[in-house]
Amino acid sequence: MKKEEEIKKLAEQLEKDLLQMYGSPLLSGDDLKKAMGYRSVDALRQAIARKTVPVNVFSLKNRRGKYALIKDIALWLAKQSIETSKEEKHPE
């Protein structure tokens, strides 16, 4: 299976799992911190301020906080998993 197909398949499964776990297509605050693997909400805030968060994070009008789509998080996680495992299997 091609790497892109593996990523797509894994991302779809992760998106389904995250939607079931969090019950919403977008995350913020503590849920976003957990899904992205940050140690604390402050670490997430700092990454947002430094623009180092690896997914699109955005604001919503008349809402507090920053948000990210589960779809983007799932795709990022799938890419990390597949690309890291491929590199470990075939080091250059």
Image: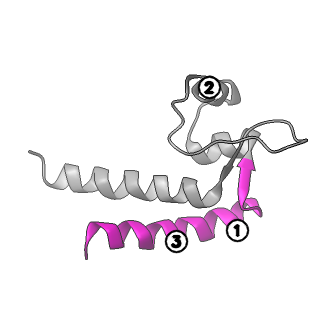
Earlier in the chain: of badge 1 and badge 3, it is: 3
How far is the residue under mark 3 from the one under mark 2?
A: 27 Å
Q: Which residue is mark 3?
A: 12
Find out whether the residues at labels 1 and 3 contact each other: C-beta distance under 8 Å.
no
Let me know if residue 36 is in the magenta part.
no
Earlier in the chain: of badge 2 and badge 1, it is: 1
In the picture, the disc for residue 43 is: 2
Q: Amino acid at mark 1?
A: Gln
Q: Amino acid at mark 3?
A: Glu
Let me know if residue 11 is in the magenta part.
yes
Residue 44 in the image: x percent, y percent?
63, 31
Q: Which residue is mark 1?
A: 20
Element type where label 2 sits in the image: helix
Q: Quadrant of the C terminus?
A: top left
Residue farthest toward the front in the current orientation of the protein: 61
First to last magenta residue range: 1-27
Q: Residue at x 28, y 66 (%)?
A: 3
Q: Main secondary structure of the magenta part?
A: helix
Q: Residue at x 74, y 44 (%)?
A: 28
Q: Residue at x 60, y 31 (%)?
A: 39
Element type where label 3 sits in the image: helix
In the picture, the disc for residue 75 is: none
Residue 10 in the image: x percent, y percent?
44, 68
Image-based side of 73 in relation to 10, left or right: right
Q: Residue at x 48, y 66 (%)?
A: 11
* Tally of marks: 3
- Relative to 39, say whether 15 is above or below: below
What colour-coding does the image apply?
Answer: one colour
Element type where label 1 sits in the image: helix
